[in-house]
């Protein structure tokens, strides 16, 4: 079988999916939330499928609901502001609501307690293994991918205007620019991951001779990994000059380094799960790409790291 046999189907799917993803990312808000929540739900379902192949019986419905709610927590500041304004305008009433931290705590604690309680009465497999895989899936997939929503929401709701605009406040045009920066930050991260994967795939397939991590992913090579790492850095530096004016060249390069390293580690982590479950793909959902977890495994690991760096370093 040719190394590139699946390439046509991969390209066709990419030509359809990528424009849709980019469009929803630039729209932001509820549209971007639904995109990430869909990807997260599908990937979590596939994660539970891998766990089942190892003999676990995760509480899939409970986990999927909890995962969706945790994704929603990252959109909560927008929901809170819009609900507060709506009730105040329509009913002249000041609505009292949970803080984002409180809501996250309530959802996570209730999820843990409900999972423990259900397993008390369940008679299927190992309770410890069932609970562990149920909770792990939500933390690995839903929580990590949810930070991508948090990152997108930073720009309309958490951007330090005084740090980037001399006036200390932003007019409508500048607010629009800030929101565009949010969309372009997500897109630049995605493109950096995609080009890293693409460079690693082609260079590794044609020039690769030294195995990167043979026991986990025998087809990956150091030559491919280095090529992907370099392209990731180049992508973020180019993005800085084209669409990410709020970034310094140093921050752009560091983000490229982080994506180039941790994106490939995310891929290897999922490969480790699949090898343990003795499967090639997490599912057959996407022709030529495998499952949602296969396609977004790097993003699962990269999202929280990029979010933390931008929120606590770049924008702090």
Image: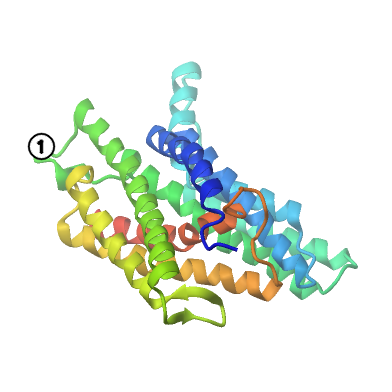
* Residue lying farthest to the left in this orientation: 166
Observer-nearest residue: 99 or 127?
A: 127
Look at mark 1 in the image and give the residue it sits on: 167
Q: Quadrant of residue 192?
A: bottom left
Q: In the drawing, does residue 119 fall left or right of residue 72?
A: right
Q: In the drawing, does residue 158 fall left or right of residue 135?
A: left
Q: Residue at x 88, y 67 (%)?
A: 124
Could you tell me if residue 242 is visible in this image?
A: yes
The quadrant of the rendering that contains the C terminus is: bottom left
Considering the numbered disc 1 on the image, is that residue within a helix, a strand or a loop? Answer: loop
Q: Position of residue 272 (x, y in %)?
A: 59, 74
The quadrant of the rendering that contains the N terminus is: bottom right
Observer-nearest residue: 223 or 96?
A: 223
Q: Residue at x 64, y 50 (%)?
A: 42
* Residue lying farthest to the top in this orientation: 90
Q: Residue at x 56, y 56 (%)?
A: 5
Q: Position of residue 115 (x, y in %)?
A: 74, 61
Q: Quadrant of residue 314?
A: bottom left
Q: Residue at x 74, y 58 (%)?
A: 114
* Residue lying farthest to the front in this orientation: 1
């Amino acid at each position: 079988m040719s190394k590139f046999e699946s390439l046509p189907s991969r390209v066709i799917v990419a030509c359809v999916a990528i424009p849709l993803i980019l469009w929803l990312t630039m729209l932001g808000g509820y549209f971007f939330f639904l995109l990430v929540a869909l990807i997260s739900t599908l990937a979590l379902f596939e994660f539970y499928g891998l766990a089942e192949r190892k003999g676990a019986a995760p509480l899939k419905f409970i986990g999927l609901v909890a995962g969706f709610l945790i994704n929603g927590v990252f959109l909560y500041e927008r929901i809170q502001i819009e609900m507060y304004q709506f009730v105040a305008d329509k009913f002249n009433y000041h609505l009292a609501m949970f803080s984002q931290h409180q809501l996250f705590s309530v959802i996570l604690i209730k999820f843990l307690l409900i999972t423990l309680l259900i397993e008390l009465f369940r008679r299927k497999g190992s309770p410890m293994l069932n609970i562990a895989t149920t909770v792990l899936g939500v933390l690995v997939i839903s929580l990590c991918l949810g930070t991508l929503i948090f990152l997108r929401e930073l720009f309309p709701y958490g951007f330090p205007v005084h740090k980037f605009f001399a006036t200390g406040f932003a007019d409508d045009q500048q607010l629009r620019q800030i929101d565009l920066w949010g969309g372009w930050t997500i897109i630049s991260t995605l493109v950096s991951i995609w080009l890293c994967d693409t460079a690693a795939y082609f260079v590794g397939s044609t020039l690769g001779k030294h195995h990167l991590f043979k026991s986990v992913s025998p087809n990956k090579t150091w030559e491919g990994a280095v090529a992907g790492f370099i392209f990731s850095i180049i992508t973020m530096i180019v993005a800085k000059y084209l669409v990410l004016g709020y970034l310094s060249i140093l921050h752009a390069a560091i983000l490229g380094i982080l994506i180039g390293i941790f994106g490939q580690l995310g891929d290897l982590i999922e490969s480790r799960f699949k090898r343990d479950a003795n499967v090639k793909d997490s599912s057959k959902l996407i022709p030529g790409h495998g499952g949602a977890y296969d396609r977004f495994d790097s993003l699962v690991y990269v999202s929280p790291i990029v979010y933390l760096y931008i929120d606590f370093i770049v924008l702090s």
